[in-house]
Image (cartoon, coloured by chain):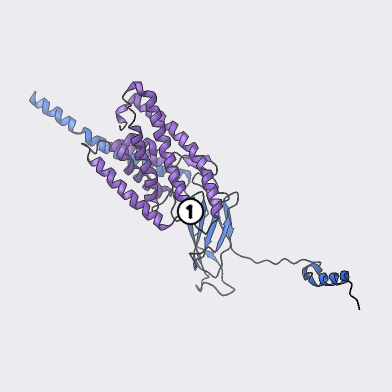
Chain colours: A purple, B blue
């Protein structure tokens, strides 16, 4: 789920950079307020690696194929670090594998990063250190994990539908874009389950890693 | 003289029949051209079948020169106008995904770009695929390099955090 270069109007790409610039500034400002801003860089780096590699593992769901995005999980673990981590991961994906593109980097970062920050906020409703709230923590993790990807897919679909050019068959493109939403629904379900598994593991092994 | 309505109708019909129908033979003409075949795939290798293709000529990049759809294998073939040289842009789109590729087409060795009958279309660097074109091994190596960069960053910051600890030990030893 990457918006590619060259398919959308320039105004969309410029708007994406404007949004990403603002959110990156806000995230870094929040990070700098921490007593030791460098303390969480190791886990941010490792999750950036996971995010970077996850785009190479494809699951074919017609009419397209999907891959894990992990933005919900990144939001849960990293909090405000998630947005710059996603931005860096997307940059390397674009440069090395051509996923997305440099022009679309801002749009893709906003599309995947803002839901990650919202996932972080959702997960704050839980308390993973409290063993009695195990089920509630799992529910919050599922909502955060699947909700983040569902929101990203919704933004992707809205941007796609709003920018169909006159040079193609708009009705056909609209139909297939809406059909692809079904595939994203399955992806959201899978990511939600995966997020619950990782969060459950972290709750048992190292709950202090969860940002809440 | 009275003209029968039926005879008049028959006369008009005979006059209206195309000469092609009168003939019993057939004629097939052909023209040798150089075509460009593109193949559109998703990153996972799945063909982009029935994706919408738009071709833009170098002399009019704003308006489509040709529209079409890829076949079941994600392939699309077109013959560019040999008199129009430059970068032919081919855009493939399906459900918001897609790519744009520029195919440089030069004129003949004289460089006049067209007009004469002896001109040939030369495809300078026509890509065979619209994905990144890396082999799985190359992708794996690149992914490993990227992951190692992130792991190295993590190790660097983890090391800086733990470095003050030995200093505390040495101080306590001196005090003891």
Say left or right for A48 vs A192. Answer: left
Say left or right for B84 vs A211. Answer: right
Chain to which the residue tagged by mark 1 belongs:
B
Where in the figure is residue B128, as x and y percent of width and height? 53, 54
Query: Does residue A69 appear anywhere in the picture?
Result: no
Where in the figure is residue A66, as x and y percent of width and height? 48, 41
Q: Foreground residue, A83 or B70?
A: A83
The residue carrying mark 1 is B99
Q: Foreground residue, A154 or A145?
A: A154
Count residues near mark 1 (Cα–Cα under 10 Å), then give few for <14, some for 14-19, many for 20+: many
Q: Foreground residue, B141 or A53?
A: A53
Say left or right for B38 vs B19. Answer: left
Say left or right for A86 vs B23. Answer: left
The quarter of the rendered structure image containing the N terminus of chain B is bottom right
Q: Is residue B99 above or below residue A144?
A: below
Q: Is residue B48 above or below residue A43?
A: below
Where in the figure is residue A30, as x and y percent of width and height? 25, 41
The quarter of the rendered structure image containing the C terminus of chain B is top left
Label 1 SS: strand
């Amino acid at each position: 789920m990457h918006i590619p270069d060259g398919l959308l109007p320039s105004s969309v790409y410029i708007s994406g950079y404007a949004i990403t610039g603002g959110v990156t500034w806000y995230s870094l400002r929040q990070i700098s307020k921490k007593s030791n801003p460098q303390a969480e860089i190791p886990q941010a780096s490792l999750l950036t690696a996971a995010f970077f590699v996850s785009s190479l593992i494809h699951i074919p769901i017609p009419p397209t194929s999907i891959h894990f995005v992990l933005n919900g999980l990144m939001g849960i673990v990293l909090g405000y670090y998630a947005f710059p981590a996603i931005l860096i991961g997307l940059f390397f994906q674009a440069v090395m594998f051509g996923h997305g593109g440099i022009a679309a980097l801002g749009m893709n970062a906003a599309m995947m990063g803002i839901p990650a920050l919202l996932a972080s906020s959702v997960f704050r409703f839980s308390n993973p250190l409290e063993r009695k709230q195990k089920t509630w923590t799992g529910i919050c993790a599922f909502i955060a994990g699947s909700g983040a990807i569902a929101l990203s897919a919704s933004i992707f679909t809205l941007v796609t539908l709003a920018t169909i050019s006159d040079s193609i068959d708009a009705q056909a493109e609209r139909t297939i874009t809406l059909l692809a939403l079904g595939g994203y629904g399955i992806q959201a379900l899978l990511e939600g389950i995966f997020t619950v598994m990782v969060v459950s593991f972290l709750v048992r092994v190292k709950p202090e890693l969860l940002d809440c | 003289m009275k003209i029968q309505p039926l005879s008049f109708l028959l006369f008009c019909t005979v006059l209206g029949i195309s000469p092609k129908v009168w003939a019993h033979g057939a004629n097939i003409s052909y023209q040798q051209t150089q075509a460009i075949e593109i193949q559109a795939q998703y990153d996972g290798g799945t063909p982009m079948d029935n994706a919408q293709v738009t071709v833009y000529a170098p002399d009019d990049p704003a308006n489509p020169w040709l529209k079409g759809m890829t076949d079941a294998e994600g392939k699309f073939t077109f013959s560019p106008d040999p008199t129009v040289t430059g970068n032919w842009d081919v855009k493939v789109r399906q459900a918001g995904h897609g790519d744009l590729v520029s195919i440089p087409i030069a004129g003949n060795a004289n460089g006049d770009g067209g007009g004469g009958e002896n001109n040939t279309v030369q495809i300078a660097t026509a890509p065979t695929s619209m994905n990144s074109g890396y082999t799985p091994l190359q992708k794996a190596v690149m992914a490993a390099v990227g992951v190692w960069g992130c792991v190295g960053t993590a190790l660097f910051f983890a090391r800086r955090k733990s470095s003050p600890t030995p200093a505390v030990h040495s101080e306590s030893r001196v005090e003891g």
